[in-house]
Amino acid sequence: MIDLYTATTPNGWKASVALEELELPYEVRAINLGENQQKEETYLELNPNGRIPTIVDRDADDFAVFESGAILIYLAEKTGRLMPTDTKGRSRVIQWLMFQMGGVGPMMGQANVFFRYFPEKIQPAIDRYQNESRRLFEVLERRLSDHEWLAGDFSIADIANWCWVRSHGWSGVSVEGLEGVQRWLDAIAQRPACQRGVEVPTRPVRADDEKATEEFIRKARSMIQK
């Protein structure tokens, strides 16, 4: 059994989607980011960075893993699924995983901050992060225009990138004209395990729900300063 400490964010979805795809039993320990539970001492003992997600593998002497990319690699290696074991195949998956960790996630995250959360609209910053996110989407397009998945078979690389790219509208970044990316987004969205994973621990806020969106943004503004 695995304990999953998480919240409704793209990084949190990466862990829950992987757990659903791998059919591993897990219990959700929802972290209320608005109440700063991720900074409580008991949580920091598991995750010194004070972020989500974190897993604790009860079947491995309560072994804790933090950082979403590290969690994906751990779960894939634990089960022997969603990542090849041969050197080149494993490397291909990790390359695209690191692409998300070092590029897609940080750039879309900053686009969210400046486009959605900051009360002051600093247009050069918004343009910078939205344009860079779009550039990264075009890198994905170059790969996905003639490959079904990012690294051979469906893998943790697809999970990691999808969990972020699927929220492109929230970041104000278009996928128009990126037919390969659109096909890939739709294909993963049709997977039942992925559908379940992005509703953990709760369903995400819909951009057309104005009241819920305003409350989400209010909480996010307080969190980005911590």
Image: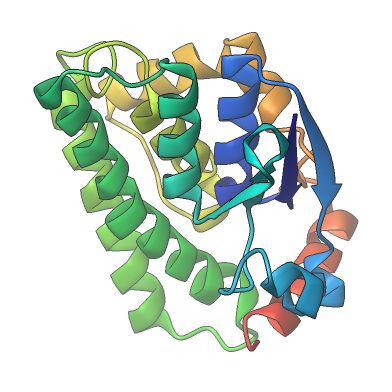
Please determine whether, in this image, residue 202 is positioned above or below residue 215.
above
Where residue 178 appears, x then y in whole percent? 27, 29
Q: Quadrant of the N terminus?
A: top right
Task: Name the one closer to the observer, 31 or 60.
Answer: 60
> Quadrant of residue 46 in the image?
bottom right
Q: Is residue 148 visible?
A: yes
Where residue 27 appears, x then y in whole percent? 82, 35
Task: Please give the name of the residue rendered at 50% of the width and 76% of the height, measured from the top-left corner.
Answer: 114
Total numbered circles = 0
Please determine whether, in this image, residue 92 is positioned above or below residue 168.
above
Please determine whether, in this image, residue 203 is positioned above or below residue 17.
below
Task: Name the one closer to the observer, 27 or 118.
Answer: 27
Q: Quadrant of the C terminus?
A: bottom right
Q: Is residue 40 visible?
A: no
Please determine whether, in this image, residue 99 is positioned above or below residue 86.
below
Where residue 126 appears, x then y in whole percent? 41, 73
> Quadrant of residue 24 in the image?
top right
Task: Please give the name of the residue rendered at 53% of the width and 46% of the height, measured from the top-left corner.
Answer: 169
Where residue 212 appears, x then y in whole percent? 87, 56
Residue farthest along the front direction in this orientation: 61
Which colouring convention does the figure follow? rainbow
Task: Please give the name of the residue rendered at 69% of the width and 73% of the height, measured from the top-left corner.
Answer: 44
> Quadrant of residue 26 in the image?
top right
Relative to 10, 39 lies left or right: right
Task: Please give the name of the residue rendered at 61% of the width and 21% of the height, measured from the top-left corner.
Answer: 194
